[in-house]
Amino acid sequence: MKPVPPRLTRSPGQRPGVAIVHLGLGAFFRAHGALYIAEAMTASGGDWGIVGVSLKSPSTRDKLAPQDFAYTALELAPEGAHVQTVEVIQDVLVAPEDPHRVLARMADPETRIVTLTVTEKGYCHEPATGRLNMAHPDIVHDLADVPPMSAPGFLVRALQARRAAGLRPFTVLTCDNLPENGRLVRGLVLDMARAIDPALAEWIAVEGRFPSTMVDRIVPATKPEDIETVTRLTGRLDAAPVVHEPFRQWVVEDDFVDGIRPDLEASGATLVGHVLPYEHMKLRCLNGTHSSLAYLGYLAGYETIADTVADPLLARYVKRLWAEEILPVLTPPPGEDLAAYVDALFLRYANPGIRHRTWQIAMDGSQKLPQRILGTLRENLAAGRATPGLNLAVAGWMRYVGGVDEKGQEIDVKDPLASQLRELSDGAEGTDKAKALLGVRTIFPADLADAMEAGVVAAYERLLTLGVRGALEELEGS
Ligand code: CS2
């Protein structure tokens, strides 16, 4: 019998004080923001330890606690794997178990920044308008009652407690793939605060800071074989390693409460005055094509993005999307060469070490389409340019949320609107399914739905008649 390797533990030594609370402790933050913050401390010192908060499940805490919250980051490059141990997380709280403890930690004078990766749907907003969804059950609960359940609720109630204690607010630093994410969260927090206490809203509006950020690193869900790789490379058992590609980028608006923040430049982040051009570049070039490839790749039978772009037909499709439909309506950030950016992106997708499932990226499309695809579509339509590639992507999403793939197999669709979308699709026949889905106003504003209809319905019809491959071949011939 092979001996069981020892469990990963934290190295002895001093622990930094905690100044950051992170809401939504998923793999992405542990493979991205946490590394930047850890490296900033190594380079420039400071007490920037992190307390992670899981808003739903205890599973990450349960895996990390026995290893004293240390974990391994496994980098998978085409040329090989590389590991490092990360020790920046000091504790993990599980909000539903003890929400008061989470609030107390956020309201602690030592806490300077609250970072978030709660995914698009965690903001409880309407994707089409960017406003707080006042009818969302968690928001209804959080307006009526303390302790809260939602991310906006925790932010507002903790800021309320800080104000009551005469403290400065913390900086809210969102790291989710949303357009103008800082501005968006500020708006949601103010919407909620206004409904609770207008004076609180006023204080947050004046004193609070919500820098926008562009975050980028491909971090697929950790698989059992990744855990085995980590054990092989380190000789230790880690119940919760994270897996990532070599590339990473973090562009942050330099607007923090009292200017207090870790030395993020020291770890390679870019601090700027305006993030928007970087966000547009990343959300539209990367996430827009990620989603397009996820829907069409899934329907074509591919398990991962790397498998999808290994098919020359889909590789040509994504290159065409960039060249003909995405780059023409994009303003490059200062000094950025967009053609080189998308060439590098293609190589990142093709990295055979990164097994990023199309199914994972296809999740929550109702929350993702507006910022990833619909903005680009709208701007092309305004310029009088056709968007046959993006129309196919939207039609692919429609086929996907219809819940049955091209072989007639059920799809396990994960989306907060999954049942509504399925009902709309099931309630219509043929291309009327596409028209019914275009009627979902929380995704497609009326004017855009009208302008898109002819193109998307035609693309949907081609997918029904020819299947993904046939429709892509026809697109190439056009
Ligand atoms: C992906 C992103 O799951 C998804 O929807 O498109 O998580 C993507 O991998 C990251 O944004 C890359 O930075």
Image (cartoon, rainbow, N blue to C red):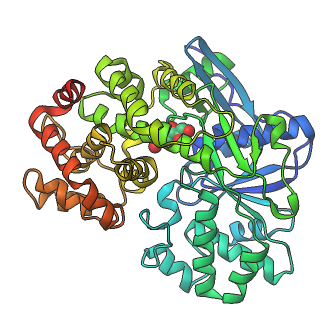
* Viewer-nearest residue: 90 or 288: 288
Residue drawn 15% across and 33% down?
Answer: 467
Which quadrant does the N terminus fall into? top right
The x and y percentages for residue 431 are 11, 51
The x and y percentages for residue 368 are 43, 52
Residue 161 shown left or right of residue 412 in the figure: right
Which quadrant does the C terminus fall into? top left
Q: Residue furthest front?
A: 384
* Viewer-nearest residue: 359 or 4: 359
Above or below: residue 9 compared with residue 174: above
The x and y percentages for residue 9 are 75, 34
Residue 50 shown left or right of residue 189 in the figure: right
Callout count: 0
Above or below: residue 145 compared with residue 450: below
Residue drawn 75% across and 70% down?
Answer: 208
* Viewer-nearest residue: 414 or 315: 315
The x and y percentages for residue 344 are 55, 23
Q: Give residue 268's quadrant in the image.
A: top right
Residue drawn 76% across and 80% down?
Answer: 203
Above or below: residue 312 compared with residue 131: above
